[in-house]
Image (cartoon, helix red, strand yellow):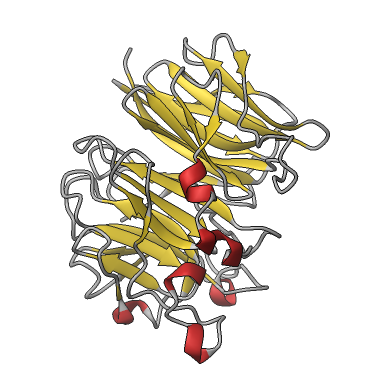
Amino acid sequence: MSKRILVGSRKGLFVFEHDAEGWQQSGHHFAGAAVTAVLAEGPVWLVALRHGHFGPKLHRSDDAGQTWRELGVPAFDPEEADKPAVDTIWCLTPAGRTLWAGCLPPGLFRSDDGGESWQLNRSLWDRPERKEWFGGGADDAGIHSVVADPAVIGKLTVGVSCGGVWRSDDDGQSWRQASAGMWAAYMPPERRHDPNIQDPHRLAVCRDARQYWWCQHHNAIFRSDDDCQSWQELCPAAPLSHFGFAVAAHPADPQTAWFVPAQADECRIPENGDFYVLRTEDGGASFRKLNQGLPSSPAYHLVFRHALEVGPDGQDLAMASTTGSLWVSMNGGDSWQRLSAELPPVYCLVWQQAAR
C-alpha cells in the first residue's frame, strides 16, 4: 500500500503520493478551476469544481485520475421562483450506493446513480426553521458536513453554517435538530442557545465509536458523548482556541481529536501569528500544542474546514492552508513535514491508502 493525498485548491486538483522514495507530486488536474470538494473511494474519484463563469461542475474518474467524465450537478428546480442557484458543492459523502452533496445555498442533494443525476432533499429544505438560517463567511447558509453511519442504514447527520446540526434516522425523509448545548457568541443573550442559529464549522465522528462526536464551532470546541443528543463545551481549550474551522477525529480512539485554531471573525489568521495544531487525548480535558516542523511565528496560515484529515491508522495526518502549504505528519501530529509551500490556496484534501 502507498499513501496518497488529493488536494483541492483554487487552481485545480493536486495529487501527492508516498512510496519507498518518499513524497512526490504525481498529478495536477483541472488547472485553473477551483476545487471545492473531493471524494475518493479506491480508484473512483469525484471532484466538484466552481468555475467563475460556468458555476459548479462535477467530474468522475474510475481509474484514479487517468481519465475523467463530466456528471450532472445538483440544481434547484428553475420553475420554482423561490429557488436560488447552487453556488458551491461544499461536500460529497457516500452512504452505501447513495451519494449526498451538501451545497451553498443550503440544499442537500441525493444521487442514486453515482452522481449522474441529483434530487433535492425536500424534507430538509422545506423545514420552516430554514427561513432563519443565515450565512457566516458567505452571504447564505451552507451545508458543509454530511456524515453517514455505515452501520445504521439511513442515519445521517448534517452541519449547517449557520443553521446548526440536524439528524435523520430514515434516510432523509424527516429531520430533527441536534444542536442542544451549543451556544453562539454572535447572538444576543436571549438567543445564544437557540439550536437553529448555531454555526458548527465542522463535524467529525469517531469511526469505531460513533456516539462520540467533535465540533469546531464559530466560538468554541464542543464534544458529544451521546451521539449528538447533547453537546458540551470544552472549556480547557479556551486559552488556546475559541475559533477555527478544522477538526479531525481519531478513527479508533474516541478520546483523541485534532484542531487548528485561528483568530475569530474578520481576522481569520492565527492569533499573533502563532500557527499550531491542538491535540487532545483525554476527551478534551486537556490539549497539547503541536508545532514541531510548522513555520515559526509570525506565520499566517489558515486551515479551512476540509483541509485537515487523518488516515485510517490514526497516526497519519495531512493539513493544508490558504497560503498554499501542504504538511504531513506520520506520528499523530508530534512532528510535521512540509511537502510544498508553492500551491494555490487549498480548500480541501483527502487522505487515501492507495493499493499498488
Quarter of the image that includes the C terminus? top left
Name the residue nearer the viewer: 196 or 145.
196
Q: How many marks?
A: 0
Residue 316 rendering spot, x and y as whole percentages: 31, 42
Residue 51 vertical position relative to residue 202 in the rendered view, above or below: above
Name the residue nearer the viewer: 333 or 237.
237
Q: Mark yes or no: residue 295 visible.
A: no
Task: Tell me which residue sits at (47%, 82%) in the image.
Answer: 192
Residue 176 lies in quadrant: bottom left
Q: Mark yes or no: residue 253 visible.
A: yes
Residue 45 rendering spot, x and y as whole percentages: 48, 21
Task: Tell me which residue sits at (48%, 32%) in the image.
Answer: 110
Query: Left or right: 78 with respect to 99?
Result: right
Quarter of the image that includes the N terminus? top left
Residue 18 rendering spot, x and y as whole percentages: 40, 26
Query: Left or right: 138 with respect to 237?
Result: right
Query: Left or right: 317 with respect to 132?
Result: left
Task: Tell me which residue sits at (70%, 43%) in the image.
Answer: 87
Residue 254 vertical position relative to residue 162 in the rendered view, above or below: above
Residue 221 rendering spot, x and y as whole percentages: 37, 70
Task: Tell me which residue sits at (69%, 45%) in the image.
Answer: 83
Residue 310 vertical position relative to residue 280 in the rendered view, above or below: above
